[in-house]
């Protein structure tokens, strides 16, 4: 029987109710909106400190390297009665080559006893094993086999040619609520119905 692979972790979005508010305009009234740098700092702090993000942080280090860093592109800021709802995208600034990222990720997807049987630990050997696994899965569970095959193809497109210093898109359509706190802005992720995964394991 084909072995079912562990699902690679992705960042989870916490649910929260959306409040009524006003979108940022050119005038802005008397409301002082945070700039993009302050928003990014609050989002990074939330990602780095929230214990629920532990597995996501491991995935970011696997894909981006030890010095890999999340970047944020702010799309919209809406005032929410003293807080700000932020719509943004997240990308990964690479600190290693993309082939190394794929090797490190695939090493977590192949059981150790199977990895020991590979002819070598090259990226090609890993991809060959995973593609064979996808074909085997498709015979008993077509959806899972197709999902694994699609994930491998997408990851290859995203990372194979990436170099240290490149930026790789991860997720689009994220939402967060930023509230003023004594030490600065406090970020809480919100449930967002239109989130799209780009260069993450499916």
Image (cartoon, helix red, strand yellow):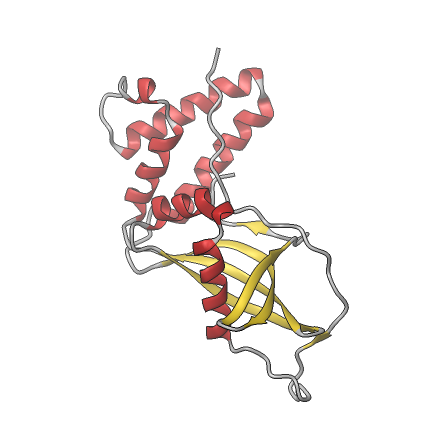
Q: Can the viewer see residue 169?
A: no
150 lies above or below 67: above
Most foreground residue, 186 or 135: 186
- Seen from this angle, which residue lies furthest right? 20
> Position of 37 compared to 159: left or right?
right
Q: Is residue 17 left or right of residue 149?
A: right
Return the residue found at the far front: 182
Residue 116 located left or right of residue 79: left
Residue in view at x 34 percent, y 50 percent: 64
- x and y percentages locating residue 88 in the rendered image: 56, 63
Q: Residue 77 placed where, x, y %? A: 62, 72
175 vs 15, nearest the viewer: 15
Q: Is 180 situated left or right of 167 in this image?
A: right
Answer whether residue 57 is visible to the viewer in this image: yes
- Percent position (x, y) of residue 60? 40, 48
Q: Quadrant of residue 140?
A: top right
- Seen as rendered, the residue at the extreme left is 120
Q: Residue furthest top?
A: 1
x, y percentage for residue 34? Answer: 55, 77
- What residue is at 72 percent from the left and 73 percent from the top? 81
Vertical placement of 40 versus 33: above or below?
Answer: above
Could you say which quadrant of the image residue 166 lies in?
bottom left
Q: Residue at x 28, y 50 (%)?
A: 97
Q: How many marks?
A: 0
């Amino acid at each position: 029987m084909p072995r079912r692979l562990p699902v690679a972790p992705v960042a989870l979005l916490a649910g929260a109710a959306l409040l009524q508010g006003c979108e940022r305009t050119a005038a802005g009234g008397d409301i002082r909106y945070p700039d993009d740098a302050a928003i990014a700092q609050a989002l990074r702090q939330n990602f780095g400190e929230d214990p629920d993000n532990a597995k996501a942080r491991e995935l970011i280090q696997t894909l981006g390297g030890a010095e890999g860093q999340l970047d944020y592109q702010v799309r919209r800021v809406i005032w929410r009665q003293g807080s700000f709802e932020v719509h943004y995208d997240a990308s990964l600034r690479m600190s290693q080559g993309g082939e190394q990222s794929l090797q490190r990720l695939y090493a977590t997807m192949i059981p150790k006893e199977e990895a020991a049987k590979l002819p070598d630990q090259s990226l090609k050997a890993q991809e060959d094993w995973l593609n064979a696994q996808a074909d085997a899965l498709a015979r008993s569970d077509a959806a899972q086999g197709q999902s694994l095959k699609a994930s491998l193809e997408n990851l290859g497109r995203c990372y194979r040619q990436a170099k240290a210093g490149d930026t790789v898109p991860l997720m689009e359509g994220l939402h967060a609520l930023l509230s003023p706190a004594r030490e600065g802005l406090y970020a809480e992720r919100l449930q967002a119905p239109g989130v799209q995964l780009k260069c993450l394991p499916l």
